[in-house]
Image (cartoon, rainbow, N blue to C red):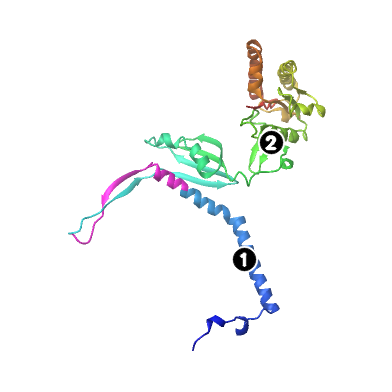
Amino acid sequence: MRTDWEHFSLLENGLTLSPYNFITILIATGVCALVAFLYYRFCYDSFKKLLHRQKLARMVLENKWYEADTVQDSVFFTDLQSRSREKIVWFPKIYYQMEKGLLHIRCEITLGKYQDQLLRLEDKLESGLYCELTDKTLHDGYIEYTLLYDMIANRITIDEVRAENGCLKLMKNLIWEYDALPHALIAGGTGGGKTYFLLTLIEALLHTNAVLYILDPKNADLADLGTVMGNVYHTKEEMIDCVNAFYEGMVQRSEEMKQHPNYKTGENYAYLGLPPCFLIFDEYVAFFEMLGTKESVSLLSQLKKIVMLGRQVENCPLSSVTTT
């Protein structure tokens, strides 16, 4: 028996597109689409975990951060020459964990000759894993690198940036606890979005009871806020007076807190129901270059006092948000 494949037709040999077959095809297509969606939604991170572990292992191998001995393979026939190969006898211990959008990479510190390399992995990890380093902590026996995973997927819109309970949500898994860390620095190149980031923070803080003081020596975007809100300054004299008044207000508020009937050592302004105060200073370095020696020394001294007082008494979470 032979089949004429040149003139073979599925429709003529029993395959028909009946309504039942059409529904079956739709169901099969839907199941495949559902499986693909579920894999992307719940198993995508599993694939990334495997890829990250492979990159970490390859990093150690290609940089030769291990100890190896040369061994001879035994052969069955004695007249054949045995082959030598490299056998790894020591490999650095690196622990990997992905949790809540953050990568935790821990490297064991054994005082060996590769210790310096393991203590300076932040650049390799950021570029190799395409993550952003958020913390580097040295513990007893190991160092831990914490990185923000999948930065683009964790971005949020301006409307989603909210300030609640002393915290500002900046990304899905990144929160600025300005009660605990009352100072911030925003740095970046020209056109990198520093001013828009500042405007986003200001917009979120305006929905709270926070008191804002904004300094813009360029008389640009932030200075335009003066048409809709107070405490916005752009001239040299106004900005210097604002810094001095801000420091005096912190000292006065510190004394008032201690006289408060509910004052308790170790608690901050929020415990007494007081509003947070923010000093937002745009183009901080450029402004100092515009001042004379005497003025710059005096202003820098006031800012140092503000930073010290804000960290020490924790009564006014100053956010000296500076762009360079």
- For this view, does 284 lie left or right of residue 136? right
Q: Is residue 66 magenta?
A: yes
**What is the residue that sits farthest to the front in this orientation?**
6
In space, the residues marked 1 and 2 are separated at their CA atoms by 42 Å
**Residue 32: mark in rendering:** 1
Please state which amino acid type lies under the numbered disc 1. Cys
Residue 271 image point, x, y percent: 72, 30
User: Regarding mark 1 in the picture, which secondary structure is present there?
Assistant: helix
Write the residue at 57% across / 56% down: 43
Discs 1/2, front = 1
Q: Residues within 10 Å of mark 1 (few under 14, many from 20)?
A: few
- Compared to residue 300, the image places residue 318 above or below, namely below
Q: Which residue is mark 2?
A: 167
Q: Residues within 10 Å of mark 2 (few under 14, many from 20)?
A: some
**What is the residue that sits farthest to the bottom in this orientation?**
1
- Compared to residue 206, the image places residue 87 above or below, namely below
Residue 40 image point, x, y percent: 60, 56
- For this view, does 158 lie left or right of residue 4? right
Residue 207 image point, x, y percent: 78, 35
Write the residue at 50% across / 38% down: 144
Q: Which residues are magenta?
A: 55-78
Q: Is residue 92 magenta?
A: no
Write the residue at 65% across / 38% down: 175
* Quadrant hosting residue 272: top right
Please state which amino acid type lies under the numbered disc 2. Cys
Residue 125 seen in render: yes
- Compared to residue 106, the image places residue 12 above or below, namely below
